[in-house]
Image (tube, rainbow, N blue to C red):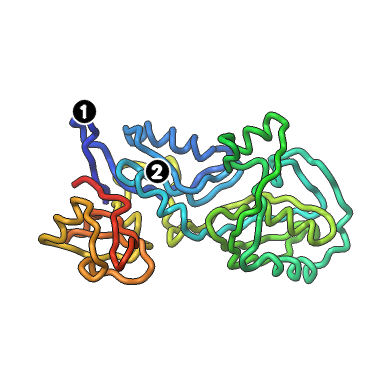
Amino acid sequence: MSSTQTNKGSGRIGPSGLLVVDKPPAWTSHDVVAKLRGVLGTRKVGHAGTLDPDETGVLLVGVGKVTRLLRFLSATTKAYVGEVVLGVETSTLDAAGDVVATHDMAGVTLAQVESAATGFVGEIDQVPPMVSAVQVGGKRLHELARAGIEIEREARRVTVQRFDVTATPDPLVYAIAVECSSGTYVRSLAADLGAALGGGAHLRALRRTRVGSFTIDDAIALEAASVDRLLTPADALRDLDAVTVDGELQVAVGHGKVLPLDDLGVGGDGPWRVLDPAGDLLAVYEPHKAGTAKPSVVLPT
């Protein structure tokens, strides 16, 4: 079920909602957005969590009002499957790059790979790869990399909840399953795993299988996308705790007022989605000060 909104100045009703797309290979995340702008008939389309062209899987695409909610979707945990190829380092840390070094790693065993992988589980400091969308000094790293420039990057703290490895028929290729926090680069995990084993490695065939609670089973093929497949804004934020308000409290939320937590009826760390009695999303509230909550997003009704 989808929702709609009025585009400013035109009076035209445009779509709002979330599409869970199974991104195909050879498409950039921006390509998917551009395609869906045409399919859905609106410019107001964005995505949460970039996938590289060679990568496939779950891509969350916000439409209309939901473009304002994408930061809540980007900040959630993610899961991936892929393959680590031992013995070959590339310029991009994945199969899309040029080979920059090779190592004889024929003697590496599954037990050694499993042991090395455990060293990357938990909170770790990870340096973003040069071929990434991270901005440094107003420039994205991949733009600098294309110009042949490599700069120092600060390590970022990320969390890896799971890093499982499985042998394949090729003794130099290991299947991996990773669950991690937002901002984790699986390419970097693969390269660091190779280094920890005394050589090098790169990633291939990466597929994102989950973003928050949205899995491959929820995803649709790009060619199947339509307004009818949009999830409502309330369903888009299904991973957030919800509270329903009515009467004067509903009016206060609609006006974006700071409210006591007790009045709003919420607890925990937030953020919280605030719904009207019909189940439509009114706003997203976050903790404020002195036992209050403030709206970070209030949706027009």
| Closer to the camera in the image, 58 or 116 | 116
Q: Which residue is mark 2?
A: 224
Q: Is residue 175 above or below residue 268?
A: above
Mark 1 touching mark 2, by CB under 8 A? no
Residue under the point 79% across and 41% down: 99
Q: Which residue is mark 1?
A: 10
User: Disc 2 marks which amino acid?
Assistant: Ala
Q: Mark 1, residues whose alpha carbon is within 10 Å: few (<14), some, or many (≥20)?
A: few
Residue under the point 21% across and 32% down: 12
Tell me the quarter of the picture where residue 271 sits.
bottom left
On the question of residue 234 being in view, the answer is: no
Residue under the point 67% across and 51% down: 127
Please state if 209 lies on the left or on the right of 84 as rendered: left
On the question of residue 115 being in view, the answer is: yes
Residue under the point 52% across and 50% down: 57
User: Disc 1 marks which amino acid?
Assistant: Ser
User: What percent of the width, then of the height, locates residue 29?
Assistant: 50, 40
Secondary structure of the residue carrying tag 1 is loop
User: What percent of the width, then of the height, locates residue 254?
Assistant: 19, 52
User: What percent of the width, then of the height, locates residue 70?
Assistant: 40, 48
